[in-house]
Amino acid sequence: MTEYPTSFKVDKEYRPVCLAGLREAVPMHETSISGVVSRRQFVIGAIGGTLAVNGALGSAVAAGRAPKVQTASGEILGYATENVNVFKGVPYGAGTVGARFKRAAPVARGTEPFVAHAVGDPCYQKNEDWKGWVDNRDGSENCLFLNVWSPIDAWGKPVMVFLHGGGYFYGSGGAPLYDGQRLAERGDVVVVTVNHRLHALGFTFLGDLAPEAGYAANVGLLDLVDALEWVKTNIAGFGGDPDNVTIFGESGGGGKVSCLMAMPSAKGLFHRAIVQSGAQRKLRTREEASKDTLALLKTLELGEGDAAKLAEIPVERLYEAYRKVSGTVSARGGLSSPFCPVVDGEILPWHPSDDQALELSRDVVKMYGTNAHETTYFLDFAGLLASPKTDEDVVRDATTFLTLDEAEREQVSLLLNDYKARFPGEGLDRIKVRLLSDLWMASDSLKQSLKASATPSGAPVYHYMFTWTEPYKGDFWSVHGAELLFTFDNVDADEMWGESGAPAARANRDPEGDRYLLRDHVVSAWTSFAAGGLPVLRDGTKWPAFSAENLNTMVLGEACEIKADYFGATARAAFQKIDVGVGS
């Protein structure tokens, strides 16, 4: 019996997606699986003296033994489900207690096998998110762990490295929603999820306050580079192809993907990138980040000359001070709020939207996309989800949520008329949520898609809009994160947005089980993109690439179809004048 995370149900019609035929029809992009190696000849590990373990990982399972892999830091012992080998809580960097604000040292080589049966600690935090997004632990300053799911008998499979959401403030690669077992099994890929340093532990900038101390900027992102280095060095032993790595992330994870594409130290460590509801275009400046640090020092009753003392403050005090300084993160520019990545000139030389950053990643095949109702529960939290009675109510709520000036308010009024014409069957309440969602999330995704696709001789860019709706507050919305249920094949997950009974609500609304077909399409698209650089739906439909000339957008919902210029000229023009995106 296959094991799945607590509170996640297995759908009755488990129909594996076999992508072998699709991949034969898709031109491989930058793959380098050399030679033909039979499963009987499979050798675990590619470091120095490799360790043979009676063929592939699956052979060890068949013989009644736990799967084991030799890595650069020693032997790793996992466990097996029916079709997948699982390795949880694998350290990819040394502990950072005592080395705060510095790049982590490599993991010391162990003399005994490391038992990888439980997820490692997330970064220290007080995460009060919904059940599916939380792994129920406060975490630790020592948080450099990753998890690997690999199909049994895997050899040279595409590797998909997922970067968790939660902005740069909280979250965990060990959350139930991100369990990679079913994606690995259904998509025939190796899945990796990662924990790394967050908030003040990952993004306190000391470069202008304590330059002599040897602290690094953006250590939370350097952790991700180290994780990708670990993947490059070790993933062949788990059945993955180190020369075919896709990074993907949602919300803050999409921001992290955006940043990695702008980091010289990450170049060559991945070959494709998927940014889900988190296209980040702008970062903190050195001046802004230094002000954040000064505010942190003041909260801790330290002076400007005491910046180096932040490395010695107990983690609990540092975190509470960070919370006071950060306050409530505003919707506008949420991914560039205090204690987020900074353009420091070395680790991150550019904003992700800068020409130099796009040139750095021009060989990376990219996919950007958002959901139709991204703002639903954010508006709810802000007390703004209530149905508007007039157009003026919509403009007022948009002004409050996105902090608009007078010129931007006028653009919203024009845009509202356009949306009512484009979606004539929708009430004003849904028009409001859709419009604010596009201003807040989709505009950044569209702008980044346009700029990336215009990079000379660049790799293809693909664009999507996810429209399938999920139960929330007695209605159905395509909320922020809804596509993750389909990406990770957890479409029957309960309590994802604070309510129990979601599976029953879905079943009542979708008696024919169309959500399972959409799941097949999404898993196929994401994993075929990872395999060959071209997303292909379950029925063999290939996405056309996006460009300024065609503006092709794949709509993923009750029907999956390509629409040229999904937003239309009026909305695109307004997006250029209302620069209020979460990643702006």
Image (spheres, rainbow, N blue to C red):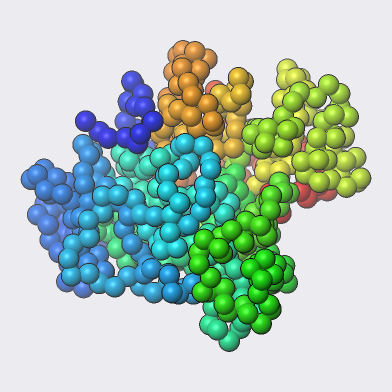
The answer to whether 244 appears left or right of 276 in the picture is left
Nearer to the camera, 504 or 574: 504
The answer to whether 490 appears left or right of 445 in the picture is left
Depicted 434 relative to depicted 49: above or below: above
The quarter of the displayed image where residue 120 is located: bottom left
Q: Residue at x 16, y 59 (%)?
A: 43
Q: Residue furthest bottom?
A: 212
Q: Residue at x 75, y 32 (%)?
A: 384
Q: The N terminus appears in which quarter of the rendering?
A: top left
Q: The C terminus appears in which quarter of the rendering?
A: bottom right
Q: In the image, residue 374 lies at what x, y percent?
A: 64, 36
The answer to whether 400 appears left or right of 12 in the picture is right
Depicted 423 relative to depicted 22: above or below: above
Nearer to the camera, 356 or 11: 11
Q: Residue at x 59, y 37 (%)?
A: 480
Q: In the image, residue 416 lies at what x, y percent?
A: 82, 31
Nearer to the camera, 217 or 231: 217
The quarter of the displayed image where residue 426 is located: top right
